[in-house]
Amino acid sequence: MADDYATTFQIVDVDGDGLISIPELSRLMEVLGEPITPEAAQAAVARIDVDGDGLISLEEFAGFLSRHRAG
């Protein structure tokens, strides 16, 4: 399942460390024309972050998207 989302994840993971941080999520939303506050970005990461490390792994990202996929 994670492989299905790996390309998208890599685009968001700007620094290439294998994790999406709050600043990376904020930047994504800004680029998409939907800027969010740092607090909103932190809350979004917290909703997706299963292991509680404050970052989004590929597995967490894929799991979230697969659960919330429109269709």
Image (cartoon, helix red, strand yellow):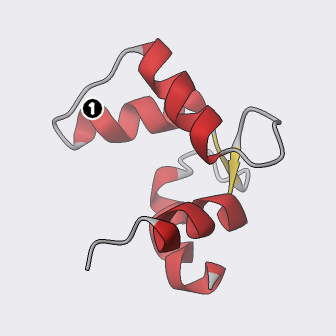
Residue at the (45%, 68%) spot, across then down: 8
How many labels sit on residues? 1
Disc 1 element: helix
Q: Position of 55 compared to 7: left or right?
A: right
Amino acid marked by disc 1? Glu
Q: Residue 66 at what x, y percent from top left?
A: 50, 74
Q: Closest to the observer: 16 or 32?
A: 32
Residue at the (63%, 33%) spot, across then down: 46
Q: Quadrant of residue 29?
A: top left
Q: Quadrant of residue 30?
A: top left
| On-image quarter of the C terminus | bottom left
| On-image quarter of the N terminus | bottom right
Q: Residue 61 at what x, y percent from top left?
A: 59, 60
Residue at the (45%, 59%) spot, across then down: 11
Q: Residue 38 at what x, y percent from top left?
A: 46, 15
Q: Which residue is mark 1?
A: 30
